[in-house]
Image: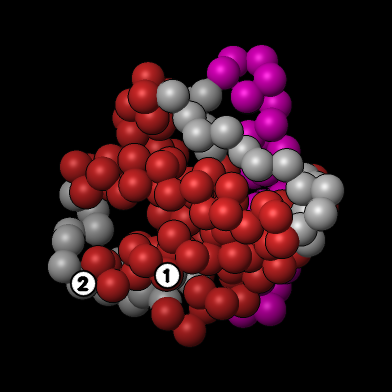
Amino acid sequence: MILAFVVWVALVLHLYLLDGVLAAHVGVLLDAQILLGLYLALFVRPGWIPPLLVAAGLCRSVLVEGDTALHVLVLGIPVAALVPFRRVFARHHVLWNCVATILLGVALPRVGGLLVPLAPGAAAVPAPALADLLVLAVTMPLALAALRRLPPFRTFQERSE
């Protein structure tokens, strides 16, 4: 499990780098924050959510301004709001993944905007446009399905998966 955690941290850091490269050259096709938020909220075993969340916040703080605590809170608050719904909705249903993507796409910039005054020097991330949210709603379930097949991500999933 420790080796899987270390590999997971390395892959998350590279996922954030890929997100930046795609955003610079292609536009909005992938949002690493939303992708990790969906994965953590819907598929990770509950005991592994806090360490994986802290690792994701640490990886993001390496690349983006702001403290690790700020990045953990920006990702953690929407994830905590979605975790109770994992028992209500079918996690493998594409429509539910699209709706959860839109919810995270709206919630993450707003939570980040609320927490920016707590971290001097951090800049707020603008909310995506409606067209970008619709593109993300189509691409995120596909990216999430591919991400869940990777060995370190598969290790932390619930056994019923």
Mark 2 lies on residue: 87
Q: With 63 as the anchor, is 100 left or right in this view?
A: left
Q: Report the magenta residues as a range.
A: 1-27
Q: Position of residue 158 (x, y in %)?
A: 36, 74
Verify whether residue 23 appears in magenta: yes
**Residue under the image location 19 percent in, 42 percent down:** 95
Name the residue rendered at 62%, 76% in the picture: 51
Residue 54 drawn above or below residue 22: below
Res. 125 image quadrant = top right
Taking the spot 59% from the left edge, 65% from the top edge, the residue there is 73
Q: Between marks 2 and 1, how big is the CA–CA gap?
A: 13 Å
Residue 8: numbered disc? none
The residue pinned by badge 1 equals 80
Q: Position of residue 62 (x, y in %)?
A: 82, 52
Quarter the C terminus occupies = bottom left
Q: State the residue lying farthest toward the front.
A: 117
93 left or right of 65 in image: left
Q: Is residue 55 visible?
A: no
Is residue 79 positioned above or below 18 on the image? Answer: below
Q: Secondary structure at mark 1?
A: helix
Rendering coords of residue 38 (x, y %): 41, 54
> What amino acid type should be assigned to the residue bearing mark 1?
Ala
Disc 2 on helix, strand or loop?
loop
Q: Nearer the viewer, residue 92 or 149?
A: 92
Q: Amino acid at mark 2?
A: Arg
Q: Magenta span has 105?
A: no
Q: Quadrant of the N terminus?
A: bottom right
What residue appears at the point 41 percent right and 42 percent down from the top-left corner?
106
